Each structure stands twice: as structure tokens, then as C-alpha cells.
């Protein structure tokens, strides 16, 4: 019985509370995010360029199909999660471009998270208004 090879390469990216699961394979340049084309899903040009940046750096735009499932957080954080997931998938798909991807920061997780609210405070650091009398 022949073994079936999976044509997809996977990568997972996270940013704030957004999680992106990215699948890539050789293809015609199709880019789908949650069932919508990338230009339709991300509203601003900054988000679109963030989501496409690893493809441009690896010089594979138009030759790889990208399928993304992303959830959580807002659109900008989702674009950051897609960027990291795509970078990780590309580094596994083409190990020769890993150094370029790392140099541009596409393999580094942005660890900044929202600071938790403390009791006795209005927000994470903002205290309630203080009155002397």
C-alpha cells in the first residue's frame, strides 16, 4: 500500500489573543482567509501588506496557495498572527529562506499582551480618583 504525502505545510501564528492556522502548498497564488479573499477580509492596506509580507520576502508570491483560519482579537492582531503563521510555514516549506524571514522578524512571536486589571484600581494601572476630604 502506497503512502499518501500531504501537499500542505502548516504554520501557527499568534498575536495578542488571535490565533492563525496557515496551510500553504504549491499553486497559482490563491490567498484565502476564513473563506474570503485576503483583500476582502482585511480592510486596510497596512493589514493586507502585513499578511502578504512573508510571501514577498521569500519571493514566492503568485506561486503558492495560502489558506488561513484565524480567530480571536481584532483585525490588526489577526494580520500579525497570519504574518507569523505564514512565516513559520514558509520556513518549513523552503528552509533556504529561513534566514531572510528571521531577519525581517517573521519568525519572532510578539509577546506583548494586555496587562490584567488589578483590584483596587479602575484599570490595569489607573487608580480610582483620590479625594483627600
Image (cartoon, grey):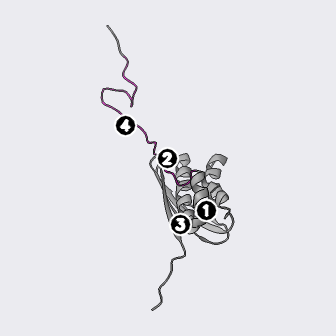
Residue 113 position by quadrant: top left
Q: Which residues are magenta?
A: 105-129
Marks 3/1: CA–CA distance: 9 Å
Residue 49 seen anywhere in this rendered image of the structure: yes
Callout 3 environment at 10 Å: few (<14), some (14 to 19), or many (20+)?
some
Residue at (64% x, 72% y) in the render: 27
Q: Is residue 11 magenta?
A: no
Which one is nearer the viewer's eye here, 85 or 91? 91
Q: Which residue is mark 4?
A: 116
Choose mark 3 or mark 1, whichever is in front.
1
Q: Which residue is mark 2?
A: 110
First-in-chain label (3 vs 4): 3
The tag on residue 92 is 3
Marks 1/2: CA–CA distance: 21 Å
Q: Which residue is mark 1?
A: 97
Residue at (61% x, 62% y) in the render: 97
Instruction: Give the secondary structure at mark 1.
Output: helix
Marks 1/4: CA–CA distance: 38 Å
Amino acid at each position: 500500500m502506497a503512502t499518501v504525502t500531504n501537499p500542505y505545510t502548516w504554520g501557527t501564528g499568534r498575536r495578542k489573543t488571535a490565533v492563525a492556522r496557515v496551510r500553504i502548498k504549491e499553486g497559482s497564488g490563491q490567498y484565502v482567509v476564513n473563506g474570503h479573499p485576503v483583500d476582502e477580509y482585511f480592510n486596510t492596506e497596512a493589514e493586507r501588506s502585513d499578511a502578504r509580507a512573508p510571501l514577498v520576502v521569500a519571493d514566492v508570491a503568485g506561486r503558492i496557495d495560502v489558506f488561513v483560519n484565524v480567530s480571536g482579537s481584532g483585525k490588526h492582531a489577526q494580520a500579525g498572527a497570519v504574518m507569523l503563521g505564514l512565516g513559520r510555514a514558509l520556513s518549513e516549506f523552503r528552509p533556504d529562506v529561513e534566514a531572510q524571514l528571521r531577519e525581517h522578524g517573521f519568525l519572532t512571536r510578539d509577546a506583548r499582551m494586555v496587562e490584567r486589571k488589578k483590584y483596587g484600581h479602575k484599570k490595569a494601572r489607573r487608580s480610582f480618583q483620590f479625594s483627600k476630604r
